Amino acid sequence: MKNLIATTAMAICLALPAGADGYKPDPNAQSGGNIVITYKDDVATLDPAIGYDWQNWSMIKSIFDGLMDYTPGTTDLRPGLAESYTISDDGKVFTFKLRSGVKFHNGREMTAEDVVYSLNRVTNPATQSPGAGFFWSIKGFDEVASGEAETLEGVTITDPTTVQIELSRPDATFLHVMALNFASVVPREAVEAAGDDFGKKPVGTGAFSLADWTIGQRLVFAKNKDYWRNGVPYLDQITFEVGQEPIVALLRLQNGEVDVPGDGIPPAKFQEVMNDPAQAERVVEGGQLHTGYITLNTQIPPFDNADVRRAVNMAINKERIIQIINGRAIPATQPLPPTMPGYTKDYKGYAFDQAAAKAMLADAGFADGFETELYVMNTDPNPRIAQAIQQDLASIGITAGIKSLAQANVIAAGGEADQAPMIWSGGMAWIADFPDAANFYGPILGCSGAVQGGWNWSWYCNEALDAKASEADAIVDPARADERLEMWSEIYMSVMEDAPWVPVFNEQRYTMRSPRMGGADALYVDPVSIPVNYDYVYVTD
Amino acid sequence: MIGFFLRRVIQSLLILLGVSLITFVLLYWLPADPVRQIAGRSATAQTVENIRQQLGLDQPLWVQYWRYLTGLVQGDLGRSYLQKTEVSTLIASRLPASLLLMAGAIFAELLIGLSMGVIAALRRGTATDQSLMIVSFIGVSAPQFVVGLLLLYVFAVQLGWFPIGGYGTFAHLVLPSMTLGILGSGWYSRMMRSSMIEVLRQDYVRTARAKGLTRLRVIFRHALPNAILPIIAMIGIDIGIFMGGIVVVESVFGWPGIGQLAWQAIQRVDIPIIMGVTLVSAAAIVIGNLLADLISLLVDPRIRTR
């Protein structure tokens, strides 16, 4: 994963020659075969404008395509339904040249009209898309979001195969936004025919089409023989069986009935699997763009005092917390995970030093400590992690009561300015929507997220940093990409100075594949097609 | 008798109305905001308000409840917030699986519970009796999640007699039915034991024995049918217990029933589904009780005169 940093940084430099694609076909890949993948939770929807779950994220990627895409197993952008693109000098106009001859699963050819329709649809409030907010930078977004307009002013067709998107201000992350599932191209007639049921009757241009869906039991994807990318997908069919506990899925995998447990290796079985050489050999480990953190509410005394927050940062024994999750993580020093461009490598974070923390707390006027509350989601291992945090806090004199609640209730408490002094983010932690440094700032550390119902649970609002973030994201010129990342690095360093968070760990993903599954390990822990990139894996028997 | 039946039906409908009102109010008071779940973490305040308006969640509680109720009497349970599918479709596609599991569980618990109870009663005071009662106690107390995984591990993984979870054939039904049934069988064995002991003391049993009938004939012809009566009425009440149990058991065995649906909906604050499943479960419990009453009425004429 280490060289991901370098390769991603290159991808951010939009200097890609149009049509560039770092992917080299796997010489051992063979076509054909069916595989079985399990998930615990049912698939709510396959509508790309709506789906935002662990289990449907890469399913949607396999059924639909957007203008932009990523090289399999990496975070490198590559063109998708757009054959090429250009960006104006001021960074505000993106022009996409569409591929010709791309067909939807219903046989109709994809056109520029479909691209425009899809963007208008996802931003229209009537669609109720959880991803609508990503498109904020498109000119006319506010009018559509408020219901004043039906169509985005900035999205226009300049000729039958060219779509031009004008932004209200330069946005260096825009190509990533166009690679999100939410930007997938959908055929108008199929959406209108299915109405609210489009999520159960999806029609896209992707590598697979939905062949059968027995609600609550299984989904069957069939290979799209007319897929516009040559040579893929390899598999003829994928059966997703839902409603399977991860532990049962693992038993079935050991029994040869399942090829990939979609939810990974359950923590309770982790040691057993790793201690068995035959099984450990088939385990795939990968980083993910994830940081687990404790938020310290800067609006609630005494956490309004930066020294108190710094003291807490020094008091937490991250190694011990990582042991609780069987070592499936690495200690975090800063908000960004190490695989994200913009990560500050030489920054070591606050050193674990409870004596110094106690002294700092005393200097801040809390020699006798204080009482506070730590909110946590009530599923294992989070309450156990909260207890470890509680003990660490106790050793510097802070008495923290644990409030263990259902996920939705913790999220609701975090969204109130005066409710949760501390929250352990486990189970709700930030996993990047797209691989860019900016994605870890706005909603969780910026002023815009510090609103009622927002995700900035520290209620940290530093306007100077917000301004710097806007300035950084206005740098669209590929030649200045390093300068932009440098600015982002500085932003996160300033955040650490103010210490609204205690970054605790970056989780690693562990999954397994059956002996017959082929393809690079990276495809099974794909950083973008989460959890598995179905289009490029294959079977060897 | 028809009057009695009608009265009970009207009572049942009132109970369902009450359940719908209480559930609706509780969900309304929930600190978690369903709109936030729909809107996602990148939504602007405006998007959130927009969605709230579209779903009518900005209306006062009684307006929302009235609208739900008017839909309900027309058979409309609304659409899932997150799946956008009709709740009635989702429940209809999963209800048969749950009913099948329930039937299997009732069969399993009667089979295990009644035989244990009868044997314990006949061997009253012996070591057999005591060990059976200890087993039934464990059955009642053991968490179903653990029992399910244990059965799965022993009979499906190690012995390979049954499939490892899933749905479709009779073989798939056995282990989840047993898991659910073991809980109920604990109750039944205790009930059956005391009921049987009671019956064995009766004069007509002594008479039967005195006139020289074989032991087996006395037990199966004379004692058992009478001892079983009070227990049949319990089956109706059982349905309520099962409704709680299937949430766990369905998730262990990957059984595509409404318990799974409810569990996922609760995690995501998908209120229309939670309402729908609650009402359907409440209806099942009410119908179960109604049936229990009817059965008692049919088998025991003394109740009719009340």
Image (cartoon, coloured by chain):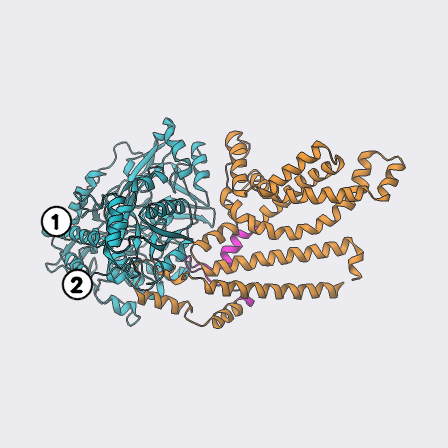
Chain colours: A cyan, B orange
Residue at 11% across, 54% down: A477
Among the 4 quarters of the image, the one containing residue B32: bottom left
Q: Position of residue B236 (x, y in %)?
A: 66, 53
Q: Return the x and y of residue B1 as percentages of the image width and height.
A: 76, 63
Name above or below for residue B163 compared with residue A391: above
Which quadrant holds the N terminus of chain A? top left
Mark 2 element type: loop
- Placement of the C terminus of chain A among the 4 image quadrants: top left
Give the mark nearer the N terminus: 1 vs 2: 2
Along the horizontal axis of the image, is A267 left or right of B11? left
Q: Is residue B95 magenta?
A: yes
Q: Of residues A81 and A166, which is closer to you in this image?
A: A166
The residue at which mark 2 appears reads as: A169
- Output the chain of dot 2: A
The answer to whether residue B31 is above or below residue B63 is above
Q: Nearer the viewer, residue B284 or B224?
A: B224
User: What range of the chain is rendered magenta?
Assistant: B72-96
The disc numbered 1 marks a residue on which chain? A
Which label was assigned to residue A482? 1
